[in-house]
Amino acid sequence: MSKQKLNYKGLKVNKIKMPFKFNLQYTLESGQIFRILKTNNAYRIFSNVIFDVYVENNYLYYNNVDENFIKNFFSFDIDFDAIVKQISIDSYIKTAIKAFEGLIILTQDPFETTVSFMCSAFNNIKRIKLMLEKISVAYGKKTDFGYTFPTIGVNFDANVLDSCGLGFRKHYIAELKKDKDFFNSLYKLNTNSAKKELMNIKGIGSKVADCILLCAYRRYEVFCTDVWIKRIIEKLYFNGNEQNVRDIEEFGKNYFGQYAGVAQAYLFLAAKRGVI
């Protein structure tokens, strides 16, 4: 993919040197973000802004956003090389890291992340993407790139959300009346307190709250436990014996420590791809 191909309708293409081992594909296709479109080796990312990215010769090329946005979104201020070394504590996680080297955790918009993971409950990635796209068409802003995600404060209607295919989730998201002050307040709370605040919202359980904290608030100590993580942890660390979901969460946090969420991201992708 050349810079010319990314220069959409005259938009300037910029580049930034990647500060750590970084794999764009593994990161964007690891289940932490949903509204992406791959074209050759470039990706279009649909959020409250829409932009294109691709990697070439240790540089990340991008358009339609500024450098500060890119640094924050791709967490370029975090030393993921050091984090990966710290979580490399056994052969299982080392195998996952070797297979998907360069996977990092994005830093996404809290409101969009909340709605996205509320849609993820009892769902698969294909359907989640379709739901979020329909929500964006219904409530977002139309641009030359596509539809942006709706802004915080949008007045979701359950009937409209039903037409977007949300099913039982429509009521939860229609009742999501939290403003910018609420989402900003979570930055100031410790992780347990922030999780409690999120779980006070109808439609948000422990796993969804952890995903929001990991993907929007950089709370790398959480251990998001879905069916894939539950199965792989039981298989690798409990001799295949079934465990309670809460026990899996606590095991992950205690075993992998302050960067348990990063370890979970590697284990999740490795499990889904059949590597471990």
Image (cartoon, helix red, strand yellow):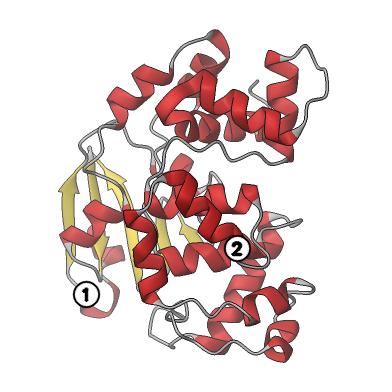
Q: Secondary structure at mark 1?
A: loop
Q: Is residue 175 left or right of residue 2?
A: right
Disc 1 to disc 2, how far (Cα)? Answer: 42 Å
Q: Quadrant of the C terminus?
A: top right
Which sits in the foreground, 50 or 175? 175
Q: Is residue 33 left or right of residue 135?
A: left
List x then y, in percent, for residue 102. Answer: 38, 32
- Residue at 38%, 84% (x, y): give it: 144
Q: Is residue 235 left or right of residue 12?
A: right
Q: Secondary structure at mark 2?
A: loop
Q: Which mark is residue 11?
A: 1
Badge 1 local density, few (<14 within 10 Å), some, or many (20+)? few
Kindly indicate the quadrant of the structure image that contains residue 243. top right
- Residue designated by label 2: 200
Q: Is residue 242 above or below residue 187?
A: above
List x then y, in percent, for residue 90. Answer: 52, 9
Which sits in the foreground, 142 or 220? 220
Q: Say what amino acid the circle numbered 1 marks.
A: Leu
Q: Which mark is residue 259?
A: none
Q: Is residue 156 above or below residue 101?
A: below
Q: Nearer the viewer, mark 1 or mark 2?
A: 2
Q: Is residue 85 above or below residue 112?
A: above
